[in-house]
Structure formats: C-alpha cells, structure tokens
Image: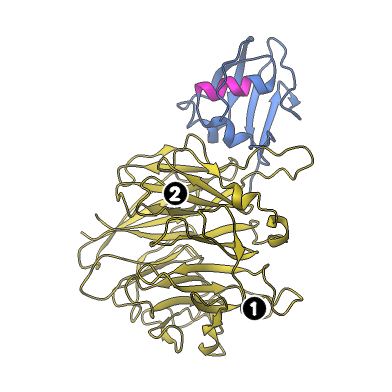
Chain colours: A yellow, B blue
Amino acid sequence: MTGTLWIGTRKGLFALRGDAQRRQWKLVGPQFLGHVFHHVVQDPREPKVVLAAVKTGHLGPTVFRSTDRGRSWKEASAPPAFRKAQDGEAARAVDAVFWLTAGHASERGTWYAGASPAGLFRSEDGGDTWQPVAGFNDHPMYATWIQGPGSPIGQLTHSIRVDPRDARHLYLGVSSGGVFESTDAGGDWRPLNAGCAAEFLPDSDPQYGHDPHCFDMHPRFPDRLYQQNHCGIYRLDRPDERWTRIGSSMPRRVGDIGFPLVLHPADPNKAWVFPMDGTSVWPRTSVDGKPAVYGTNNGGRTWRRLDGGLPRKQGWFTVLRQAMCADDDDRTDKLGLYFGTSAGEVWASRNEGASWTRIAQHLPQVFSVTYGPAG
Amino acid sequence: MVTQATAGFAVPTRVASPLRSYTAGLALVEARGTTVREALADLEGRYPGMRFRMIDEQDRIRPHIRLYVDTRPVLELDQRIEPGATLHLICALSGG
C-alpha cells in the first residue's frame, strides 16, 4: 500500500488510496458532501493526523481534524478568527480558511493557517484552537502591503513555509501582496519580491503588491526558493534577495503563467508547473486546449513538455495552486506526480511526468490534491 | 465560540438543514435568552461550534445566513425576543 491522495473539492472530500506500485487507485468518499475543501493536509510528523480547511456555501469557515487518517473528524473548537476590531478599525472576519501548513518538526501539534481576507493563524494543539498571528495581521504595513481585491474569492494567504533548520524562520505568500519573510516566528515581516514582475501595477519594480500564486522552499536545501507567480516563474537562492525569472526559458507560445508549482523532495534542481493561458483576457485554461505539465531538471534553465497520456486537443481544464503534488515516500524508483483539475479529474504519473494516467473522473471541481504517506 | 450560560425563557428555535450536524439532526431545538445574542450564546453552549458558522468574529451575521424572530428579520444581535416567539436560523440562497 502506498499513501493517500487527499482530494479536496468544491463539493466534498475524497481520497485515493494506491497500491504499492501506484498502478491501482481506489476512490473513497465523498465525505462531507457539499462542503468546500480548500486544502487538506496530512501531518508529516504524525501521519494519522489530517487537517482540512472547510466551509460551505452558507456557513462560515472552519477546520476539521482527524486523528485516524480521515475515518472520523472533529471540528476545531476555536477556528481561525481575527481579533475583535476596536473602534475605528476595519472589522476583518475570516471568510475562508484557504491554506494549512504543519509546523516545524520540533513543534509537534503546531500548525499555521492562511485565510481570506489575508490573515495568518497559528495552532499549538493540533489544530483544535487557533490564534491570530498579530505580527502579520496587525503589522503596521499590512494595509500598505495588501491592497486590491486579490483573487475572485478575495485576498488569500497561502504557501506558508517553515524553514526546517529554524522554526522561527517563516515565509508566506499573499495574493495579492507578495512573498513575505519572518525570522522571529511571525513577530515581524518584510517583503521579499525584488525582481518579480507585477504587470498590473504602474511601478516596474515594486517592493510589494505582487501576486505569487504558489511559493515553495526546498525541504532539503531551504535556501532554494521557487515561485509560480501571476507574472512568471521565479527562483531565488538565499541569501540573495532578488528573484530570477526562470520562466523566461519556457516556450514563448506557452508562456510561464500558472498556479501550481511542485518541487522534487530530494533534488533541488527539479520542479514542475502546469501552465495556463494568461494572455488577452486571461482565459485561465490549458494553453490552446492542450494540457501539459512542464518540468525542469536544472533549476529552470530549461523546461521539458510532459504531456504523455494527456488530451492532445480540446482539453480545457486547468489546475489550481493546491491541486498538484508529488509523493514523498523514500522510493527507489521515480517520483510520482499528481494533479486534480477544474473538470473534476485526477491524473497521476509514476515517472516524474513522462506519462500520465487518469485515476479519477467526474468529481466536483478539484481544489486540493495532497499526498500523505502511509506512515 | 461564546459559551457563557444564559438565563431567560425558553425560545423555540428552528434550525436550517446545513446547521443540523450540530443539533444531531434536530430541526427544532430550544434556546434560552431574552435577546438573540443570549439565545445564540445558549445554543453555542449546547451545540459547540454552531454560532461561528452563523456569526463572524465581529458579531456580524454571515452573508448567507438569515435570522428571524417570528417573521421579523434580525438586524442586530441585541434584538429582543418576546416570550412565546420563535427564533428561525435560516440559510439563504448561496449559489450553485
């Protein structure tokens, strides 16, 4: 038995459980039919623990928690919520819990959540009770950094990353606002966006206001950062401060716009993206109706088209930022890659993207595909 | 999220289907209080988590939730509930 693919959709939670060869997948679910699952994350520190960011069309946001690999769930007793506004302050309320990240390996039970509108929250009891991270939510520059409507569902906090070398070193992304860094466990933050384009702003090289769609830090080489931005694909090798647009080497007719970005868990030079059409009125479909993953083996110097088994034409789906992942078992064979689509399909590759097989279809729109090891 | 115990009289409370996961499937429950705020606090004590799905952290009724005391829409949480009135917790249309 391999691990579990957690499939969060616009209409409920599903799971795909694979055999050891990752050839056969069994679809389980739905659980919580009709609930919106923005993100479902299995705890790498305690594999029986799974957290889900949930709401429904009518009801407010919350977090569901499982301590038995998703067989049973309990709602957080204090979901992420902003502090009560004081007189004259803008009264912010969490509309959606959008992102979940397990905390540092040394801090069992610690989790971070990103919300819409932009907000960062922390739990120290396995996701049961959540507190706002004042250093971000009440930062003196918050209203300056984070402006505009953000995404169609509002400003989003996502891509929360914890440096495996230092629990106090954090990154996060805000759409739109940019990538921000904290070196004191969230007490203070600063923008980290130099070199990234923001074609929707008048300034040619602004410090903030960008739209990182997906940001990641390599787990074994945490000085290497990647991001799929609204305006291109970038890499940054710390301690440098300026991002390099590695998407410039993508085919011009494809471009380097998209949402998801997946890193190889061992090789810092390998990454995968799923380009979408970001031209003219931004159709946000696969480019030319020919869906493809693009991968790099050299840190973005060159990219390869990886579309074996995917529709050759009239395939107009796309993939959201939480909806693509790699399995991270300590395997001796090739890494598995997975993505879920706007058309309710889940695709899998057992060979790092060289060929793809559809392992689920006819699901609701897929918002999140994450891998949890069998453990 | 508010769990303070509440005095007052019994208020029959009708619960819309999306909220019945909190009431063990019951469509009609009882709250105690003399205002909507008190009744919701009492319900939260009985059915933990229910209030936050309807009322945000700024004490605003969520966009797709409607509360009524009998046929009167609830515009603010301190609205009084008269003895014998029914509180309705309704989920309004929210899209496809």
Tell me which corner region of the image, top left, top right, bottom left or bottom right, holds residue B78: top right
Q: Nearer the viewer, residue A17 or A157?
A: A157
Mark 1 surroundings: few (<14), some (14-19) or many (≥20) residues within 10 A: many
Q: Which residues are magenta?
A: B39-46
Quadrant of the image for the C terminus of chain A?
Answer: bottom left
What type is the residue that disc 2 sits on? Trp
Answer whether residue A70 is visible to the viewer in this image.
Answer: yes
The residue at the point 65 percent across, 56 percent down is A154
Tell me which corner region of the image, top left, top right, bottom left or bottom right, holds residue B90: top right
Image side of residue A351 versus residue A110, left or right? left
The residue at the point 51 percent across, 77 percent down is A236
- The location of residue A364, given as percent across then percent down, is 48, 57
Q: Which mark is residue A197?
A: 1
Disc 1: host chain: A
- The location of residue A71, given as percent across then percent down, is 32, 43
Q: Nearer the viewer, residue A189 or A219?
A: A189
